[in-house]
Image (cartoon, coloured by chain):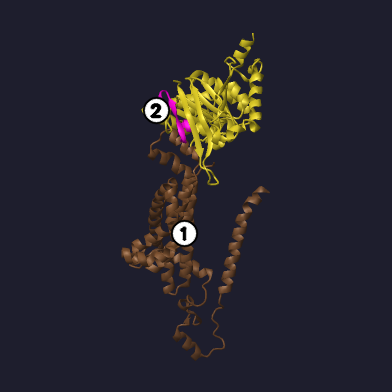
Amino acid sequence: MAFLQIDHMTKFFPSHSGGDPVCIFKDVTIKIEKGEFVTTIGHSGCGKSTLLNIIAGLESPSEGGVILNGREAAGPGLDRMVVFQNFALMPWMTVFDNIRLAVRAAYPNWDRERIAAHVHKYIALVGLKGAETKRPTALSGGMKQRVGLARAFAIEPKVLLLDEPFAQIDALTRGVIQEELIQMWNTSRNTVFMVTHDVDEAILLSDRILLMTNGPGARIAENVMVTIPRPRARVTIIEHPHYYKLRNHIIHFLVEHVTHEEETGDSNNGSGGSEKKYPRVVNFEQETLARR
Amino acid sequence: MTMQGKSSPWMISCFLLAVFLLAWHFFTLRPAFEPRGMSEEQLHMMEFNGDIVRTSEEGYAWNPEKEKVRGVPGPLMVIEKARTELAEAFVKKGTNDHGIAYLVAYTVSRFAAGFLAASVVAIMLGVLLGLNKALFQAVNPFIQILKPISPLAWMPLLLYTVKDPKWTAVLVVFMAAVWPTLATTAFGVSSLRKDYLHVAAILQLTWFKRLYKVILPGAAPTIVNGLRIAFGSALVAVVPAEMLLGELGVGYLSWIEWNNLDIAGVIFAILVVGVVGVILDSGFNKLAGFVTYQE
């Protein structure tokens, strides 16, 4: 059994117009190994953030469940920390206090000095030394998310859940923080599940990319292996022969599935012949090997 | 140029005050008593009636005691009254004649007791309602009905039930202060950003920590706005409560001076109410500054 397993999960939302509940995604099964970095890409409304929230325990699935390390993970917990799209830093606390709140919660037996040292270590790791006493309002978006990352890494969770973590950060800063994330992840090697819109970001960071079809009734359609060797950097990764193959493949998928794959919308009789084998594995490394 | 720009509001304020005081002075000014053209008999009659008094220079002047209730007193009379009252600020002359400092202390303590009790109750209930949507919706109609009732309307019932004017005055303040804080706290907590609660949930904070580290500080700006409204309405309620209940305080001072037909005293009492309000309000704003944050 995989380290983190999302098992035959289906989510319905109550319909706004009062009709039948709307199926957000259907029968999603994801298996993530320990230390793996897996990203999900899909259009807005395909339910990928809902999926992440369910893994975090912040929402509950209609069917199916989450299994972490052999045990069902229902409800939120310190073993699955989220890095939020809009940072979710407490604006009434300083940078230090924001991280300390998490560290104290994660290590209730530690004394004051040990907690402070741990917090300072992670503040230094994200390059925010000197900003400890600042409040989030005084920080730029990039710095805020550095605090968010420091808070998440500081509690050393089994699974790190990144919910479009860089969507609200300007493009130049985004690249810098992505590389900082790689460095932090290289030392910690948490299992990561990320949700994003950004194809380049997904390729840079991930071991695997899951492509979701459009909702309602979204599914994981493809499982794209990113075989580009690590360590990766933004400048060098684009030189890799598979980079644009991957990128084009993913973008094609995203563009085509706006109109295509609509048979899933017809989900009432979808149990018949249209049942495909999901997800399809895409691996350019093996394709090139096979061609040789 | 900037100095001038900064100092001008002060100068305008001073100017307006001077204009107001001068206008007040001249409109309320009465010409000195003019005995010319009056017979000896008329003067005696007026002296007998107490309208005029003999001065040391064998002339006549308006009786200052009677002047107090003739027309509106001028600023000089009010200042004179204030001077005498402030000089005896810490003097207790009898059961109902305490110095102004005592009166202010009574009013402030009465106000503080009612306001603090109301705030604690309203914040606790508000958090409870804010966190429980169904309960909020169930209780909201009652709050909406109770909220617009003037706190003074409760007074007869409160007086009948608690049978003690001291506590009734405090409870009237309580009634004035409880609804705005309750409504805004419930709103502030229920509209707290979900992210904060999510973080608290992931970090597995105890409910106590969740309340003190996340919910209360997160809703603090909204709660403070409610407290500010409650503060104002409680301050408005405390004066008539004292008047109607006959409890010693600055509100009562205004009423007792009216009973004495001392209009300068009434004006002085009004000014004291204003000054006490301003001081309490600035203290409140200082406190509010500690707990609010910028998003």
Amino acid found under the numbered disc labelled 1: Ser
Which chain comes out brown in the rendered image? B
Q: Residue at x 50, y 51 (%)?
A: B225
Q: Which residue is mark 2?
A: A107
Query: What residue sits 60% from the left and 16% below the top?
Result: A228
At x 52%, y 74%, the residue is: B72
Q: How many marks do you count on the picture?
A: 2
Inspect the magenta stretch and tell me whether residue A177 lies in it.
Answer: no
Q: For mark 1, does the 10 Å Cα neighbourhood hold few (<14), some (14 to 19), or many (20 or more) residues?
A: many
**Can residue B286 be seen by looking at this rendering?**
no
Distance CA(mark 1)–CA(mark 2): 46 Å
How far across and how far down the image is residue A125, in percent? 52, 23
Chain containing mark 1: B
Task: Indicate whether residue A55 is drawn in magenta.
Answer: yes
Q: Which residue is drawn at the image coordinates 46% and 33% (left, top)?
A: A63
Q: Which chain is yellow?
A: A
Per the image, the residue denoted by label 1 is B233
Residue B163 in the image, given as x and y percentages of width and height: 31, 65
> Of discs 1 and 2, which sits in the foreground?
2
Give, as a three-letter code, the residue at label 2: Tyr
Name the secondary structure under disc 2. Answer: loop
Give the residues in magenta. Answer: A54-71
Q: Closer to the camera, A51 or B181?
A: A51
